[in-house]
Structures are given as C-alpha cells and as structure tokens.
Image: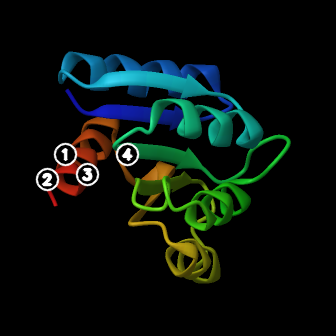
C-alpha cells in the first residue's frame, strides 16, 4: 500500500485529501509544518509527499531542498501543492526537484488524487 505524506497547514484541506486518499487505499500521514514534514519523511520514507509551499517554520521550497540533500529521501516523489500559481514559483518548485506542481484553485480534490496515482505509477 503506497504511503503518502500530506503536508498542509489548513486542517480542512489536509482532512479532505486524507479522506480521499484513504478511500483509494493509500496509507496517509499528516504534517502541519515544514519541520514536521522533514522529520516524518525521515521516519516514514513515504512513496509520495503532497507538499504545500506556504508553511509555518520552514516553507515547501526549503523542505524540497532538505529532502533532496538526503540520499535516503531524495527519491521520494513530491507534488508541490499551492495557491502560488506564478510561473516563477512553479519553475522554482520543479527546479528544486518537485515531480509535479498543483495550483489548489485549479484542481478539484479528485483531480489531485488522480495526479497522485499517475506519479506513483511512474
């Protein structure tokens, strides 16, 4: 069963994605800030991280940078999940090593789940 780490400081959103992913037979863990995200990634070694960019304590870009530095974590798939849709933000996320980028306002939860499934299959 693929493990997904959802890193999102909005409890409503993290609960919604968590419920949907659990229904799709994924094992789900949650983190509410960047520091917790890195710690949980080390403990759990998830298959994929749904990573909000605007986070307390350490933003998503810093989280990606930390994960990519660690040989044991650098192959975890990462989907950056954000409201920041500017081209520079998207490019920065992908350049740092995110596998994909979702602008929250443009995707329904179901589309987000489908994206997760696509990336995990790769």
Residue 8, quarter of the rendered image: top right
Q: Earlier in the sequence, mark 2 or mark 3?
A: 3
Q: Secondary structure at mark 2?
A: helix
With 50 as the anchor, is 82 left or right in this view?
A: right
Q: CA distance from mark 1 to mark 3?
A: 5 Å
The one nearer the camera, 56 or 108, is 56
**Disc 4 and disc 2: Cα gap in Å?**
11 Å
Residue at point 24% right, 56% down? 119
SS for dot 1: helix
Q: Nearer the viewer, mark 2 or mark 1?
A: 2
Seen from this angle, which residue lies furthest left? 121
Q: From the viewer's perspective, is residue 108 above or below residue 75? A: above
- Would you say the residues marked 2 and 1 are in contact, meaning their CB atoms lie under 8 Å apart? yes
Location of residue 28 with respect to 63 vertically, above or below: above
Residue occupied by mark 2: 121
Could you tell me which secondary element the residue under label 3 belongs to?
A: helix
Q: Earlier in the sequence, mark 3 or mark 4?
A: 4
Type of colouring: rainbow
Of residues 106 and 18, the one drawn nearer to the viewer in this rendering = 18
The residue at which mark 3 appears reads as 115
Establish if 40 lies above or below 105: above
Does the image show residue 7?
no
Q: Position of residue 100 (x, y in %)?
A: 39, 65
Per the model, the C-alpha gap separating discs 2 and 1 is 6 Å
In the rendered structure, are the residues bearing label 1 and label 3 in contact, judged by CB atoms less than 8 Å apart? Answer: yes
Residue 117, numbered label: 1
Q: Secondary structure at mark 4?
A: strand
Q: Which numbered marker is on residue 48?
A: 4
């Amino acid at each position: 069963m693929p493990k997904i780490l959802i890193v999102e400081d909005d409890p409503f959103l993290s609960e919604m994605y968590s419920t949907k992913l659990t229904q799709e037979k994924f094992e789900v863990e949650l983190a509410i800030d960047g520091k917790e995200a890195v710690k949980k990634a080390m403990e759990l070694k998830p298959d994929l991280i749904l990573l909000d960019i605007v986070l307390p304590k350490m933003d998503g870009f810093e989280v990606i940078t930390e994960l990519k530095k660690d040989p044991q974590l650098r192959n975890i798939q990462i989907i950056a999940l954000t409201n920041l849709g500017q081209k520079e933000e998207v490019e920065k996320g992908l350049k740092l090593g995110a596998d994909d980028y979702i602008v929250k306002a443009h995707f329904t939860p179901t589309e987000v789940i489908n994206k997760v499934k696509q990336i995990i299959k790769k």
